[in-house]
Image (cartoon, helix red, strand yellow):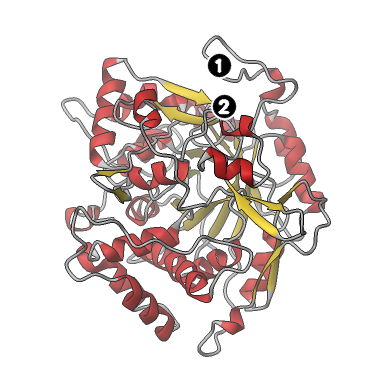
Amino acid sequence: MKQRPVVIQGGMGVAVSNWVLARAVSQCGQLGVVSGTALDQMLARRLQDGDPGGHMRRAMDRFPFRAMAQRVWDTYYVPGGKAAGRPYKPLPLRTVDSPRSLIELIVVGNFVEVWLARDGHDGLVGINYLEKIQIPHLPSFYGAMLAGVDYVLMGAGIPMKVPGALDRLANHELATYPIHVVGSSADDEAAAVVFDPREYMEHDLAPLPRPQFLAIISSSLLGQTLIKRANGYVDGFVVEGPTAGGHNAPPRGKPTFNDDGEPIYGERDVVDLEKMAALGRPFWMAGGWGTAAKLQECLAAGAAGIQVGTAFAFCEESGLRADYKRALLDKAIDGTIRVYTDPLASPTSFPFKVAQLDGTMSARDVYEARRRVCDLGYLREVYRGADGSLGYRCPSEPVHAYVSKGGNVAETVGRKCVCNGLMANAGHPQVRGASAEVGIVTAGDDLAQIARFLAPGQTTYGAADVIAHLLSGVGTSAPVRPAASEELAPA
């Protein structure tokens, strides 16, 4: 058994927590985590960019089902890369009955990211998903498990059905995953994704190792509920507070807002560490715990450690595009950084942390100038039409389209296209005419203190620097930075 990690690197999407970052963290003896969000798009766009460095090809050559990998390669690979002003080829939007070609791309995309993160070392690697993006879960899990992923982490919802799915997929058995349908009862059995690995396997395989499952939660009560009601064993928890980046759980109780329109969190939103320890499962604290002192506090209270995202998002190995990373680091250093908890930006209706940066979707004039379009669709909600059929809509799509599908026009106010924005963050923006999509950078409140990881005279830092800082004083041996030839690779 591998040693349980003290530090979990947060799974930040899209591809900010890429395989390069996860591999660097794993090589330092902690849990490197890749983002599992939109890995079908990431693989397709990396291939259309000509597969710089040949890393996609290298991983796909190790995929166990050769014909499937070749179909994906033949469909998306562009020798030398597409022209800079040309758009990326669109993918089919995910539905309950997605086409086989898309499911194959999802399986291969998840395999590739995990395989590359695991390559060349024996450290731990995890993958992070959002419960809100339910439709691709099963083929995503399977692809990651084919690559030997050690941990599956999931937040942005209540992942009751994940453990049982992992159990079945480990034995290559048919699995089902219920999909939330707006306005339907929890017993709407007609709305479910079905995935049978044996319909995709080209030859028999031995059972796969079942990864440990960590649910990302915001309260001990939710942890207790998952232990009692989940359809399989929950191996542990990441307890995420409202200062963490990305999507936050809404405040408990009647919502209130400060003068800037941000939700106000109170005492009810503070997690009781004693109650977490009483659950009897390992847990890691996240959101404002990314210091050596806070780590020691966690360990003293019975936690297994901490999860840290923001510090890793701005290190050298992360997949965040370099110009955004540099600009936000500079703002943090000079004390002008601002992270806004936007209650409206995300189509999920969860509060979403947005780092304020000119030229990105956080700038009002930039976003208002953008033509509303929903062509990635990861955060679309599923609804039932008047005829009983399933439909798909997003509050960030064109207003008339959303309303025509039965949506409330009020839900469209302030919504931003998080899907395209996060894809742009990773350096793969869709091109529309003479312009390209811009990013929407998410970070935790801890971004203001990010400069503490910079050595005197340095303007960048690496994942090993973060881990060395966090573990100082814990009695764990210091991490070793990878050799220069291995340290960075194209994402």
The span from disc 1 to disc 2 (Cα, nearest Å) is 8 Å
Q: Position of residue 86 (x, y in %)?
A: 24, 56
Residue that numbered label 1 is attached to: 261
Which residue sits furthest top?
259
**Residue 198 picture location, percent across and down:** 60, 83
Visible residue check, residue 161 = yes
For the question of whether residue 479 can be seen, the reply is: no
Residue 290 percent coordinates (x, y): 46, 31
Q: Secondary structure at mark 2?
A: loop
On screen, 378 above or below 365? below
The amino acid beneath tag 2 is: Pro
Within 10 Å of disc 1 (Cα), the crowding (few <14, some 14-19, many 20+) is few
Give coordinates of residue 99: x percent, y percent.
Answer: 54, 72
Q: Residue at x 56, y 57 (%)?
A: 152
Q: In the rendered view of the protein, which quadrant contains the C terminus?
A: bottom left
Mark toward the start of the polypeptide (1 vs 2): 1
Q: Amino acid at mark 1?
A: Gly
Outermost residue toward the bottom in this view: 203
Quarter of the image that includes the N terminus:
bottom right
- Nearer to us in this view, 80 or 208: 80
**Secondary structure at numbered mark 1:** loop
The 10 Å Cα crowd at callout 2, few under 14, some 14 to 19, many 20 or more, is many
CB atoms at circles 1 and 2 under 8 Å apart?
yes
- Residue occupying image coordinates x 60% and y 31%: 300
The circle on residue 343 is: 2
